[in-house]
Image (cartoon, rainbow, N blue to C red):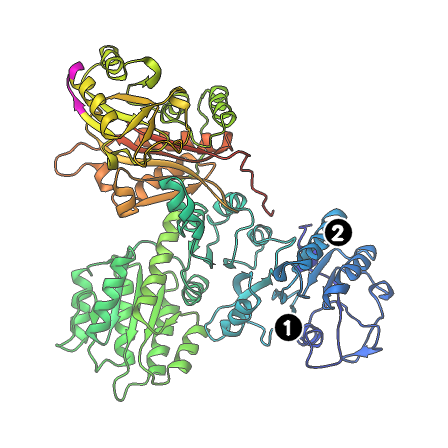
Amino acid sequence: MNSLDPILRPKSIAVIGASRNQNTIGWHILDNLLENGFPGPVYPVNPKAEAIHSIRAYPSIGAVPGAVDLAVIVVPKDFVLAVAEECVDAGVKGLVVISAGFKEVGGEGVARERELATLVRERGVRMVGPNCMGVINNASDISMNATFAPATPPLGPVAFMSQSGAMGASVLDYAGTLGIGVSSFVSAGNKADVSGNDLIEFWRDDPDTGVILMYLESFGNPAHFVQLARDITRDKPICVVKSGRTGAGARAAASHTGALAGTDLATDAIIAQAGAIRAQTVEELFDLAMAFSNQPLPASNRVAIVTNAGGPGIIIADSCEAHGLEVTALTPETEQKLRERLPEEASVRNPVDLIASATPESYEFALSCVFDDPNVDSAIAAFVPPLGIQTKDVAAALVRVNKQHPEKPLLAVLMGRDRLPTSSTELHLAHVPAYIFPESAALALGTMWRYKVMAARQTGQIVEFETNDEAVEQIIEATLASGHLKLSECDALRVLDLYGVPVVPWRFVPADDGDLAKAAAAAVKELGLPVALKVVSPQIVHKTDVGGVVLGLESEQEVAEAVSRMVTELGGEEGEGGEGDSRPPSPSHSRDSRVIDGVLLQQMAPSGTETIVGITRVPRVGPMVMFGLGGIYVEALRDVVLRLCPLEDIDADEMIREVKLSALLEGIRGQAARDRTAIAEVVLRMSQLAMRHPRVAEMDINPLLAMEDGVLAVDARVQLSAEGNDDEHES
């Protein structure tokens, strides 16, 4: 038995807090259970009533004569824990706690919720809530509406989880009008026990559910969501609206990766990695639900458009192209068939414009022709009501065509106000999604096609690399022991080397070697020329901004002169502690005086495309890896993609492909293509580093030069945290 069966498939229900007062939640929940015909026994529990709704009431759950699977608790917050304990003692296996006044109010509510969660977990009971509006299972053998929502949605393939009771009520209210049939609904509330992950796992095996909708305010356990959803979305689409789109904490991030991941990109990354679909608005969630729950997936991205007005046809065509659909050319045979029946002024090329005089019969004929065309695998029909033509008649024609071609999706756009609500409802009842605006239909159909492609994606795997993790930990511990939270640049390059990331050959020349300029000139004999020179100072982050970088030095003399000039111009004083010295300047230093620990010499890197690979840890999410265009462009263009660790091999490939300027890696204007395999390997190695070294809080490899054959890291930053970064998550 699934652990959620007592909640979503109960054989008996008790409503604790049922009331005779019709203005109470307790009355409405009991009324909904009875009105919708729950087939098992329903027990009202109220110590002050002998009967409610003409059903005998009981003073406590212990007084109920039969076994109870599910208890719906609607009592004041101060009594919830005691009532829950009575339920557990009575053998109840499922609780739905409607009552508010817990974590959402802070203070004592947090402790109150913690006690409640501890109780159910220790006793093996599952609980939805607290602070929720209840649950629904529309399956014909259950017919359970244990909510206080004013409307029960029709039966259909959509399962819906909402973290907001108000949002849930809105969906239930509109579901019937929009032709969205609901298999089950859960208002999750505070998610003290049953989480979104628990629910999608339940719906994975639910034969009545074909589409999963989620309104989330937070991810409980993002890594588990990704793991579960990757499997589920191969068979059932998951559409998510996630609120809370901003990240003020990004302002305090020390790295490019940390600053970018603090935005809504982290949420996009999790949903994309899971194979789920993100709806940007609740309206868009409705639009997608209408399409996915009523029409088959398209066999290809080739779409035909049939309209009675040129303007909407052009808008739909533009929107289709923007969403990855091809407004395909019709075969000459199809165009000839259309020409034989349509007016001379009509356009028989795709988009097919029937002109304003088009009749319902014209629509039926034209749509049948394009659906018979082997180049067409879906269609959007748009209608602007002219004088004399009834919208309802055109809607009826669309329904007939849809029945004749059930294997190809048909979406409708009904514009204008002429009997629009009635006609749209008729289409929805016949399982033809109807939209008010052309862009909505194109987005829905395009999303169906992208889901079709995504669901057929190959299965990935986690690749493990041989790395020197013991040496990496020694570097981390030594840095923390010295009182610092940032690795020196040289230590950061050492970490890359220990993790198998190719690094441009380099030498560090410490300031305590005596004559820094002379020592640097001697070092290039071993390193080789030409070289780049970089100042090493804990007080200088962006070296190029202060003249701390000199490129293309061709001789030992040039190196010596550049070092002397750099020390003088930066007003530096030589440090005494070597490269790890991160002392702040003493009060006796001038405002421009900086401690210089030494200089870093690097061989001049070959030409390549600058990319960035980074690590960050997003609060309440976990470790993430970022890839994008590097160098100065990471801030200017923000063209980056993130994924949650641990990454599978297909994640790295997708990250490289999803960067908007990925064409730069494929070779343009005669340039050779870059080594995408080598880039992907670095991305995967950084995922392994993030998982094995939780004290690495943020990290940038910027730039990572992508070349025709291989990659080279030029610069790196590593920010640590004093403690590990293991996040606590829900199930």
Nearest the camera: 226 or 438? 226
Q: What element carries label 2?
A: helix
Give the labeled residue for mark 2. 119
Amino acid found under the numbered disc labelled 1: Phe
Residue 175 belongs to the span the image colors magenta: no
Nearest the camera: 9 or 166? 166
Residue 455 visible to an observer of this rendering: no
- The reply to whether callout 1 and callout 2 are in contact (CB within 8 Å) is no
Q: Is residue 700 above or below residue 53?
A: above
In the picture provided, is 249 more to the left or to the right than 324?
right
The outermost residue toward the front is 588
Residue 595 visible to an observer of this rendering: yes
Nearest the camera: 723 or 455? 723
Q: In this view, does 549 lie above or below 524?
A: below
Q: Where is residue 402 in the image (x, y as percent from the top left)?
A: 37, 69
Q: Where is residue 527 in the image (x, y as percent from the top left)?
A: 25, 14
Q: Residues within 10 Å of mark 1 (few under 14, many from 20)?
A: many
Q: Where is residue 73 in the image (x, y as percent from the top left)?
A: 73, 65
Nearest the camera: 302 or 443? 443
In the picture provided, is 384 more to the left or to the right than 171?
left
Amino acid found under the numbered disc labelled 2: Leu
Give the labeled residue for mark 1. 148
Residue range corresponding to the magenta coloring: 552-557
Q: In this view, does 37 lie above or below 533?
A: below
Name the mark nearer the viewer: 1 or 2: 2
Label 1 vs 2, first from the N-terminus: 2
In the picture provided, is 387 more to the left or to the right than 230?
left
Q: Where is residue 86 in the image (x, y as percent from the top left)?
A: 82, 59
Q: How crowded is mark 2: few (under 14 residues within 10 Å), some or many (20 or more)?
A: some
Q: Residue drawn at (60%, 48%), measured in percent from left and top? A: 730
How many numbered marks appear?
2
